[in-house]
């Protein structure tokens, strides 16, 4: 039963208090970053201190009074509640915030980004609201933080202030707040039908009295949360949002923001409707089908992305659907797999993004086609990338395997072998879009890279063989490759890959100019140290000198996390939490 | 208790006497306007709070006042204050106080302050009266004061806008008066309580009753400025002096909407709308159309004030929707939204006033990079703008949430869709503004403002400014439309935002946040009153 405690509030309040401090300390960057790090450690400590008791079934609750009340039902409290599901999400987000904070310092300073104060403040705001999403004890409280999260992340997406970033920001807000509208409508329906929005293990019983209405509300809620979970057809904000600085892509667009959508769906399935009701109403299978379509389609699209971050984004779209698929199936094993995939995917994907960011900072390379032989320049980074990518594909002994195993068992249990097939196909596709990156990094030579048929050719091939050697010659400027020389080889690739590169990475106007101007290129490269040029190729560096430890440390930490989750899942707190959650949720209904 | 029944009278009499005194004696005393107006607003604020304390809450009772010992049965005028009126009275007094503080200026003449308190008298009168004809009188008083205030900067454009408002507003008031006439012919009463009983007696489908309602509603809807009879409003809001716009936008339509609540629910009662479903449907359709059309028109505007004016059209669509959903939840939402919208709009228009006076910027495109020049004012405006969108945990969300639940209760699916979708519609025009303020580079040096001076005063970051300067020397040599500003007496381009003005904007922003978490408190306080009305 709920224990009154200030801890859930504290987890939200610590990053929230950090916001004004960060803003006030804008002129003293070292102190400002100190505040971020302190807040990150304190938040994690707060959440972690709740874990032991929560594992035993305790629920910490901070009741901040009544938020809304009507004559129709119970008053809706503004209540924060740390139950197992909430702690699962909060623990993950707060732990990775620590890693990302260090990484952000290395990244933002490495690129000498503008408006860093705003960046760190908005980051803290995003974490505060993510904590709120985790601990919201009813749909309305969750919704409040869910919307605040959308707003708080917007300055990070539009950080670059370029035309493209502004548009990505607009799209992001339109999609997520549009999803919020659906969530609000669904919440209103649930409240009006049952008189409560409080989460209850096994679901709100009164909800199924009117099945049609219940289905409609489910569609609205899940559809709304599904926007942030990047379910197709509402996924396209996510690849566009990759224009944000990489730490944002790493923590928010692989962990906190997108998973708040997934988490919302988990709350709806487990604690608003209950797994039993989800199956009985038939909405689970519908959700699982959407997820299955998304995960295959996104994997296929990922094959064609040349920009590394966009490929990772489509991979995220696909992997998030693993989780949604499991939630839709709603059998015990599938639920365990789904929830376990939340931390598993988080550790792996954050590693991959950290690597992409490190490559960007060190070499200003964004496109996969420019990365042949990059293993020489960044050995440790690319090794971590290889490990995480293998995990994504579901290799045994890595985090992705365990969760996928449970998902497969869940699908087979329900005699829905088709979903098992989809999962296996997706595993193959994962190999297909990650392996080339790893392979060319270590086993190809930047002077003579192998052809990349998928990237260089339009679907269906070319009529003439005029692709030329040109396309294979190394590029010096980190990103204009396709726009300038590969024109005849495929407009489709251009459209996707060219856009984000041209203006994204650097805030200063000078860089944009130098990219288009080949004369300046050499200066540019040498000034950043270690980019490869047409003449010299990649500089060979050891793992000690390839980058700053502000970035390498988090990369190693996250990669190790992914391995540990795969090797000894039973000894990491996540699996234990999840098994309890699923036990309770299914016990009540079955 | 006899003392308390005098208070509603004082709400009207204090400002009325102040206005008369200022006009009659003020020119001999000189400079008394500011002080006396402040005293009057403070007095009204205090009275409104006492009344609120008395009428709100579970054991709050409405206060009825007979004037001069004439009972209503013999044709006397009555005043009536219940929980909802008390809330609106408090709003009127507080907003007047805030705008007054923000508009102190040595150059203003006493006549301005006289009109100012006269407007307050008219609006308070509309809220406290319990008599349909008396309401007309106060409607005209507040109307006349508004016309004069809008034209008070003496420019041709504002005079024209004021004239337009005068013509349309007079038509509205006349329609209202005609409706009152029909009601009087049908029943022989003007007192709202007596009318309620009489209407029920002669039947709600009686043509005289229907006509009376149609005319009264049409008149008030013009005053509220719902689409498609909103056309006076954008001109009036845009051309009026900035601080007058803030006052008018926050209070005039709000009070008219309050009158619509009172007359629709208290006099004609929900039973009338059940009997006349066509009128009911028409009103709901009008309100829904207003939400959509207002938002779309707002997106298309270049001038910030005009954009906010169209936004009011949309927001009052929501308010009227809430009224005619005819249940307690929606009515609670309506009152909260009335309150919230007024505070949001007064803050936003004062923010616009601040930017216009300090930097001479008036169009959306001129708002580029304002956040760097004026971080505090920009942050407050951003909070207010998000409250307008209806982001939780601001008051904008609370009102919308209650109205949405009310729509569900009434089974009005299309309306529920409009209400929740209004979030995204509002976002359309709000984001244009915020994007400019926060993510666009400021123009290198605005022709009207001395760049060096304003940076230091507002705590902006001078290094950022100078760093971006170099890149944009060629981009925008001048912004389109500064020529408009020259004629405005208000535009002094002082280069810095005056402290009182900034303070009021920030207070408004904080108030939207504070009210946002007090949703259930407000609901509890209003519950008894709402129950009586629905």
Image (tube, coloured by chain):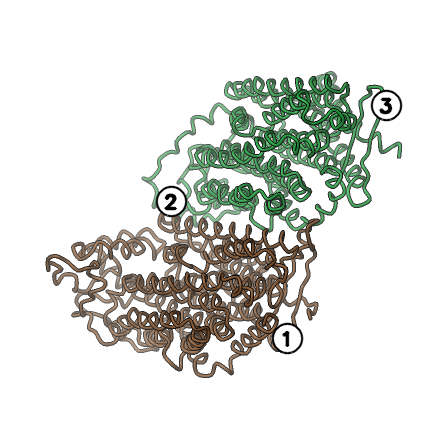
Chain colours: A brown, B green
- Front in this rendered view, residue B488 or A404: A404
Marked residue nearer the N-terminal end (3 or 2): 3
Residue A512 in percent (x, y) is at 29, 52
Visible residue check, residue B251? yes
Looking at the image, which is closer to me, B287 or A471? B287
Chain hosting mark 1: A
* Circles 2, 1 touching at the beta carbon (< 8 Å): no
Q: Measured along the vertical axis of the image, is residue B326 above or below residue A522?
A: above
Residue at mark 3 shares a chain with residue at mark 2: yes
Within 10 Å of the Cα at label 3, are there few (<14), some (14-19), or many (20+) other Cα atoms? Answer: few
**Which residue is found at the position 54% from the left and 19% from the top?**
B164
Quarter that holds the N terminus of chain A: bottom right
Residue B235 position, x and y percent, is 51, 25
Question: Residue A148: in sight, yes or no?
Answer: no
Give the alpha-carbon distance from disc 3 to disc 1, as whole Å.
67 Å
Question: The disc numbered 3 marks a residue on which chain?
Answer: B
Q: Nearer the viewer, residue A7 or A344?
A: A344
- Mark 2 or mark 1, which is nearer to you? 1
Residue at 60%, 26% in the rendered image:
B223
Q: Is residue B499 left or right of residue B160?
A: right
Residue carrying label 2: B469
The residue where tag 3 is placed is B71
Helix, strand or loop at label 2? It is: helix
Question: Which residue is disc 1 drawn over?
Answer: A57
Secondary structure under tag 3 reads: loop
SS at mark 1 in the image: loop
* Residue A319 image offset from top left, x and y in percent: 40, 67
Q: Is residue A402 above or below residue B515?
A: below
Please indicate whether residue A378 sits to the left or right of residue A229 in the image. Answer: left
């Amino acid at each position: 039963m709920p224990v009154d405690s200030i801890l859930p509030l504290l987890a939200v309040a610590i990053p929230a208090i950090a916001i004004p401090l960060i803003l006030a300390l804008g002129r003293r960057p070292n102190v400002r970053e100190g505040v971020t790090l302190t807040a990150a450690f304190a938040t994690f400590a707060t959440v972690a201190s709740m874990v032991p008791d929560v594992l035993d079934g305790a629920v910490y609750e901070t009741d901040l009074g009544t938020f809304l009340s009507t004559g129709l039902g119970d008053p809706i409290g503004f209540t924060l509640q740390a139950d197992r599901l909430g702690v699962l999400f909060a623990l993950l987000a707060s732990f990775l915030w620590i890693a990302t904070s260090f990484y952000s310092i290395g990244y933002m300073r490495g690129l000498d980004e503008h408006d860093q104060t705003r960046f760190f403040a908005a980051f803290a705001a995003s974490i505060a609201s993510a904590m709120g999403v985790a601990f919201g004890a009813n749909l309305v409280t969750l919704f409040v933080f869910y919307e605040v999260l959308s707003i708080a992340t917007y300055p990070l997406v539009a950080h670059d202030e370029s035309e493209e970033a502004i548009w990505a920001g607009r799209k992001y807000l339109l999609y997520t707040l549009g999803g919020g509208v659906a969530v609000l409508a669904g919440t209103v329906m649930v409240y009006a039908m049952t008189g409560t929005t409080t989460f209850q293990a096994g679901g709100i019983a009164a909800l199924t009295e009117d099945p049609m209405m219940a289905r409609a509300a489910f569609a609205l809620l899940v559809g709304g949360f599904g926007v942030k979970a990047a379910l197709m057809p509402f996924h396209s904000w996510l690849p566009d949002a990759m224009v944000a600085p990489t730490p944002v892509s790493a923590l928010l667009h692989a962990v906190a923001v997108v998973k708040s959508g997934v988490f919302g769906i988990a709350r709806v399935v487990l604690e608003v409707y209950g797994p039993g009701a989800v199956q009985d109403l038939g909405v689970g299978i519908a959700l699982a089908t959407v997820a299955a379509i998304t995960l295959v389609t996104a994997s296929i699209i990922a094959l064609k992305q040349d920009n590394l971050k966009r490929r990772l984004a489509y991979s995220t779209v696909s992997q998030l659907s693993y989780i949604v698929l499991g939630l839709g199936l709603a059998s015990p094993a599938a639920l365990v797999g789904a929830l376990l995939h939340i931390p598993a995917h988080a550790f792996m994907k954050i590693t991959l993004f950290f690597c992409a960011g490190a490559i960007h900072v060190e070499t200003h390379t964004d496109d996969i086609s420019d990365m042949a032989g990059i293993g020489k320049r960044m050995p440790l980074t690319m090794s971590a990338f290889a490990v995480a990518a293998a995990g994504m594909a579901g290799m045994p002994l890595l985090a992705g395997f365990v969760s996928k195993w449970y998902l497969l068992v869940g699908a087979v249990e329900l005699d829905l072998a088709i979903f098992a097939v989809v999962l296996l196909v997706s595993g193959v596709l994962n190999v297909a879009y990650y392996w080339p990156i790893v392979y060319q990094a270590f086993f190809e030579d930047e002077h003579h890279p192998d052809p990349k048929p998928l990237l260089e050719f339009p679907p269906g091939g070319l009529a003439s063989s005029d692709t030329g050697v040109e396309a294979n010659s190394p590029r010096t400027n980190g990103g204009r490759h396709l726009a300038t020389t590969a024109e005849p080889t495929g407009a489709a690739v251009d459209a996707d890959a060219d856009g984000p590169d041209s203006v994204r990475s650097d805030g200063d106007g000078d860089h944009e100019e130098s990219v288009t101007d080949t004369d300046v290129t050499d200066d540019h490269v040498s000034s950043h140290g270690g980019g490869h040029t047409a003449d010299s190729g990649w500089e060979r560096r050891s793992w000690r000198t390839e980058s700053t430890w502000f970035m390498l440390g988090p990369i190693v930490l996250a990669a190790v996390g992914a391995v540990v989750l795969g090797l000894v899942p039973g000894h990491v707190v996540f699996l234990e939490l999840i098994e309890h959650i699923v036990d309770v949720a299914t016990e009540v209904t079955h | 208790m006899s003392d308390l029944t005098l208070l509603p009278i004082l709400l009207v009499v204090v400002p009325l006497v102040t206005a008369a005194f200022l006009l009659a004696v003020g020119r001999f005393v000189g400079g008394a306007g500011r002080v006396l107006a402040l005293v009057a607003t403070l007095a009204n604020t205090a009275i409104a709070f006492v009344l609120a304390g008395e009428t709100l809450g579970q054991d709050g009772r409405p206060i009825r006042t007979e004037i001069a010992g004439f009972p209503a049965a013999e044709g006397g005028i009555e005043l009536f204050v219940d929980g909802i009126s008390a809330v609106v009275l408090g709003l009127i007094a507080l907003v007047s106080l805030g705008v007054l503080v923000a508009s102190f200026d040595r150059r203003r003449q006493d006549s301005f302050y006289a009109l100012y308190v006269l407007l307050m008298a008219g609006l308070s009168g509309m809220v406290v009266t319990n008599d349909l004809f008396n309401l007309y009188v106060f409607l005209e008083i507040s109307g006349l004061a508004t016309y004069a205030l809008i034209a008070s900067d003496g420019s041709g454009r504002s005079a024209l806008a004021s004239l337009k408002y005068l013509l349309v507003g007079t038509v509205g008031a006349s329609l209202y008066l005609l409706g009152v006439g029909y009601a009087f012919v049908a029943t022989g009463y003007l007192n709202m309580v007596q009318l309620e009983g009489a209407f029920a007696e002669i039947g709600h489908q009686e043509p005289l009753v229907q006509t009376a309602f149609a005319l009264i509603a049409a008149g008030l809807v013009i005053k509220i400025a719902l689409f498609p009879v909103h056309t006076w409003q954008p001109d009036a809001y845009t051309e009026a002096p900035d601080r007058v716009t803030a006052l008018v936008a926050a209070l005039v339509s709000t009070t008219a909407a309050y009158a619509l609540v009172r007359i629709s629910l208290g006099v004609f009662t929900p039973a009338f709308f059940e009997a006349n479903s066509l009128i009911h449907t028409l009103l709901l359709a009008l309100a829904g159309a207003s939400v959509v059309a207002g938002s779309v028109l707002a997106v298309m505007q270049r001038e910030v004030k005009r954009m906010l004016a169209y936004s009011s059209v949309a927001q009052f669509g929501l308010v009227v929707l809430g009224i005619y959903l005819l249940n307690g939840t929606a009515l609670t939402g309506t009152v909260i939204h009335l309150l919230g919208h007024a505070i949001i709009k007064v803050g936003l228009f004062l923010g616009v006033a601040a930017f216009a006076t300090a930097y001479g910027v008036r169009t959306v495109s001129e708002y580029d990079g304002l956040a760097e020049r004026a971080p505090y004012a920009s942050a407050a405006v951003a909070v207010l703008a998000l409250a307008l969108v209806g982001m939780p945990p601001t008051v904008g969300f609370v009102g919308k949430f209650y109205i949405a639940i009310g729509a569900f209760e009434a089974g009005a699916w299309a309306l529920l869709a409009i209400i929740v979708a209004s979030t995204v519609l509002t976002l359309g025009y709000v984001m244009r503004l915020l994007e400019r303020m926060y993510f666009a580079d400021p123009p290198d040096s605005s022709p009207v403002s001395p760049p060096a001076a304003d940076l230091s005063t507002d705590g902006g970051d001078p290094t950022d400014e100078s760093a971006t300067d170099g890149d944009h020397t060629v981009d925008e040599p001048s912004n389109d439309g500064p020529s408009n500003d020259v004629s405005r007496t208000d535009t002094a381009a002082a280069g810095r935002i005056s402290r009182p003005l900034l303070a009021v904007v920030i207070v408004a922003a904080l108030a939207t946040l504070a009210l946002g978490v007090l949703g259930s408190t407000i609901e509890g306080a209003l519950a008894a009153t709402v129950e009586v009305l629905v």
